[in-house]
Image (spheres, helix red, strand yellow):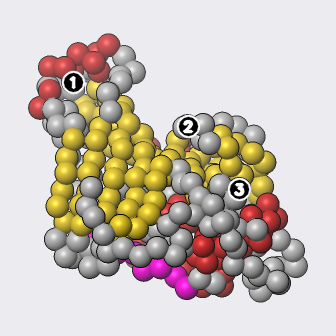
Amino acid sequence: MSERLRELLAAADPARGVQVGPGDVEAVLDRARDDVTSYATAVPPRRRAWWVVPVAALAVVATAVVVVRGVGGPPASPQPYLPPGSTSESAPCLAEIADQLAATPYDGRTGRYEYLRMTWAGGGSVEMPVADAGMATIWYSEETTRWLAEDGSGRLRQVRGTPTYPDEKSREYFEQHRELTSETTRTTELAPGDLDVTALPAADPTAMAQALYRPRENGPAQALASVADLNRERVLDSAHRAAVLRFLAATDGVVCQGEDTDSVGRTGVAVSAGRGQGPRPSPAGHDREYLLFDPRTGELLASGAKTTTAGNVEVGTVYLERGRTDELG
């Protein structure tokens, strides 16, 4: 193993900086296993790793942002949800959306498949075989469209955008090894059981907190990361969207950030929470988990990371379309 690769692996080590005492190894491993804070800001669905194949060693970084549209009528809550020990809402901007929630075109509709279309930014690095040549890096956008039935069957389509490179040596390397990036579109037919279908918590703020704020020691960023994960997996109806909003509104450490705009030009209500409260330190200065909600429908438009409380969103997922249908596209 080269010294450069060893340094990269050491920097990504989730246990880096964790003090391990005599006999504590199993306890530390158990804690690290449960620490699922979304430092990568996007959890790639199964069957995604097919574009950049490692020659010697490959480090893949994937991120995503998603957008949704809607119109319509709220599940009202006369009393705000407050978790035990709380006396006020942490993010009242989300409670206001929940109280006046408009319906989306898919609310109340039925269909065999939940339909999701989203974009994310990804890439990878390969250690070049020439001594001291360093790493070759490639970046690209990916659009993922998925039709998923309750039994895990359906269709998954992935389309990779035009790649970009941080330097000329990376461009030259990947142009010389086109077998690593030759496939730009893949459509996968899913048989029953091919994908796990994430269970929807009950449409209740308490149920959302119990299901999504885990492990709690990771802090409020864990709640935001879990909401982003849920939206990457399921289409939420108005009752579930309202429950998510009220759960986050009452989560200590989640703060309103005012209006922001996603990468496709949609303006929404932003909230964020500080990272770094779990066993792993926050890498690369991405110290705020970030969500952007449609101010009318409460749909999650984008998720990502901020370098400061008032900083720009650096990485994330954009949710472009959601719905229900009986037809595979």
Q: Earlier in the sequence, mark 2 or mark 1?
A: 1
Residue at point 36% right, 31% down? 139
Residue 173 against residue 284 in the figure, above or below: above
Q: Nearer the viewer, mark 1 or mark 3?
A: 3
Q: Are marks 1 and 3 in contact (CB under 8 Å)?
A: no
Query: For residue 6, what is the image quadrant?
Result: top left
Residue 255 against residue 9 in the figure, above or below: below
Determine the CA span between mark 1 and mark 3: 43 Å
Q: Nearer the viewer, mark 2 or mark 1?
A: 2
Q: Which residues are magenta?
A: 195-202
Badge 2 marks a residue whose secondary structure is loop
Badge 1 marks a residue whose secondary structure is helix
Residue 39 % position (x, y): 51, 53
Residue at point 79% right, 60% down? 93
Residue 324 % position (x, y): 40, 67
Residue located beneath label 1 in the image: 174
Image mark for residue 295 = 3
Determine the CA span between mark 2 and mark 1: 27 Å
How many residues crowd around disc 2 within 10 Å: few (fewer than 14), some, or many (20 or more)? some
Badge 3 marks a residue whose secondary structure is loop
Report whether 285 appears left or right of 127: right
Q: Are marks 2 and 3 in contact (CB under 8 Å)?
A: no
User: For the residue marked with disc 3, what is the amino acid?
Assistant: Pro
Query: For residue 3, what is the image quadrant?
Result: top left
Report whether 176 appears left or right of 89: left
Q: Is residue 86 magenta?
A: no
Report whether 322 appears left or right of 170: right
* Secondary structure mostly taken by the magenta-highlighted segment of the chain: loop
Residue located beneath label 2 in the image: 263
User: For the residue marked with disc 1, what is the amino acid?
Assistant: Phe
